[in-house]
Amino acid sequence: MASSNTAARRTCDLAHLAAASLVAEARLTPKPGLVDCATTGAHTDMDLSTFMASAAALEPLFAEYAAAGADLGTDGPAALARAMRDIGIRAEAAMFAATDGVNTHKGANFTFALVLGATGALMESGGTEIAAGALDAHGTEAVLTLVSRMGAGLLDHDVRALHERVSATGDTAQLSHGERLLLLRGMQGVRGEAAQGYPQLSRTLLPYLRSHPLGTHAPGAARIMLLRALVKLMADLEDTNVVHRGGPEALSAHRAFCRALDARDVPDEELIATLSAYDAELIRTNVSPGGAADLLSLGIFFALLEGLITQTDIAY
């Protein structure tokens, strides 16, 4: 068992890496339809500074997720998930307070709640120090397995509660976008991704990042690597953010575009030019692939923990 000072340092380090991952995702440019350093994407109510404020507000709550995980351990995923949800309510309130009511990181907050809780639990039980390279691929797999157990319980609870609420009231007007897509189209969104242990992360994103390790001697390489990783994610993900804004046809067209771009493996300069032009198209059609952005930030987090990239690499 770690000393209280060591445990506190671990949770703060985890929280800092998670917040740094959100910042790195937000600053990555160009991202089609998304806020970055160049445009606000398909958004009129937020910009890069909104995301910076949100990440800063969430960092102390991220530490609480990890600390709760360390306290509760790995034996009770249901209890661990409930604790994350309780903290998550306060984290979401902190986000909205920092952004004047703008939803910047609601999905990412849910995702990092489960991941930080699971990481804290496993690292406490295993006595692993938090630093670059603290996890290997097997450690990440263990975290995602625990996340899947936590997420499955939350999904089952939320689906049952949703159906009971709608059945009792007949009112669908007050449903969130995610709830409406779950009820009408069966799209489980971020809850379903969590219940499956984030398959796009483990099958697509992390294998790609592991095959392209970076050192601090390669300035600018992380930006290109992460842009290519984002294209791979957008090509496969059933992104409910895209469906909410453009319908299933928009998702089909978006994924087809990204699959074709990924398959072409264009040079770096052409990649940037193509993504910039596609950003203008998604701004025109008001489409924002926010689900892919959340998964990318999660991939950055695990890449930092596995030592695949450093914080210097993502200071672009």
Image: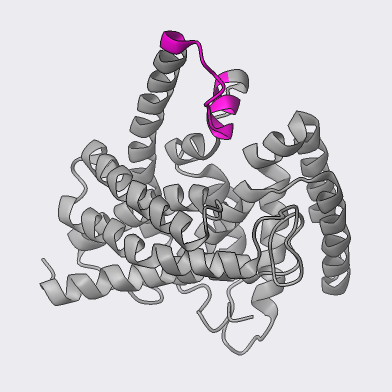
Q: Is residue 177 left or right of residue 273?
A: left
Q: The N terminus lies in which quarter of the figure?
A: bottom left
Which one is nearer the viewer's eye here, 204 or 77? 77
Which one is nearer the viewer's eye here, 94 or 316? 94
Residue at image coords 39%, 19%: 160
Q: Position of residue 129 (x, y in %)?
A: 27, 73
Residue 306 visible at all: no
> Measured along the vertical axis of the image, is residue 128 above or below residue 192?
below
Q: Is residue 28 left or right of residue 139?
A: right
Residue 182 inside the magenta-drawn segment:
yes
> Measured along the vertical axis of the image, is residue 139 above or below residue 197?
below
Residue 252 inside the magenta-drawn segment:
no
Q: Position of residue 241 (x, y in %)?
A: 65, 41
In the current view of this chain or complex, which residue is farthest to the front? Answer: 100
Residue 33 visible at all: yes
Quarter of the figure with residue 23: bottom right
Q: Position of residue 261 (x, y in %)?
A: 83, 54
Query: Which residue range is magenta in the image?
Result: 167-183
Quarter of the figure with residue 37: bottom right
Residue at image coords 47%, 63%: 98
